[in-house]
Image: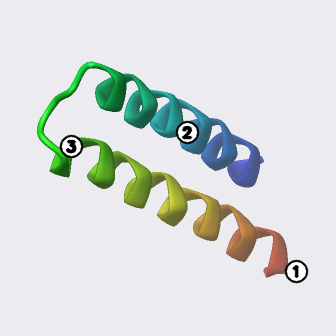
């Protein structure tokens, strides 16, 4: 269950990163969103390993 929620969160964060990139915001904002999305995907993967 948590892995699905974390994957959904990652999708929202990637969408936010893409939107901020298109709006020509400072470079660090979409980079932070992308890093948070990767961390969310990693956490979702680690939850699936748990048994």
Residue at screen point 63% across, 60% down: 41
Q: In front of the other: label 2 or label 1?
A: 2
Q: Is residue 8 left or right of residue 22?
A: right
Task: Identify the secondary structure beneath mark 1.
Answer: loop
Q: CA distance from mark 3 to mark 1?
A: 35 Å
Of residues 12 and 21, the one nearer the viewer is: 21
Whichever of callouts 2 and 3 sits on the residue coming sooner in the sequence is 2
Q: Which residue is mark 3?
A: 29
Q: Which residue is mark 1?
A: 51
Q: Which residue is mark 2?
A: 9
Q: In front of the other: label 2 or label 3?
A: 3
Within-10-Å neighbours for mark 1: few <14, some 14–19, many 20+:
few
Asked whether the residues under the numbered discs 3 and 1 touch, taking CB atoms below 8 Å apart as contact, a structural biologist would say no
Q: Position of residue 9 (x, y in %)?
A: 55, 39
Asked whether the residues under the numbered discs 2 and 1 touch, taking CB atoms below 8 Å apart as contact, a structural biologist would say no
The image quarter containing residue 17 is top left
Q: Which mark is residue 16?
A: none
Whichever of callouts 3 and 1 sits on the residue coming sooner in the sequence is 3
Of residues 32 and 21, the one nearer the viewer is: 21
The image quarter containing residue 10 is top right
């Amino acid at each position: 269950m948590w892995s699905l929620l974390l994957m959904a969160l990652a999708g929202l964060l990637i969408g936010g990163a893409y939107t901020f990139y298109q709006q020509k915001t400072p470079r660090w904002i979409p980079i932070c969103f992308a890093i948070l999305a990767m961390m969310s995907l990693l956490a979702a993967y680690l939850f699936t390993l748990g048994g």
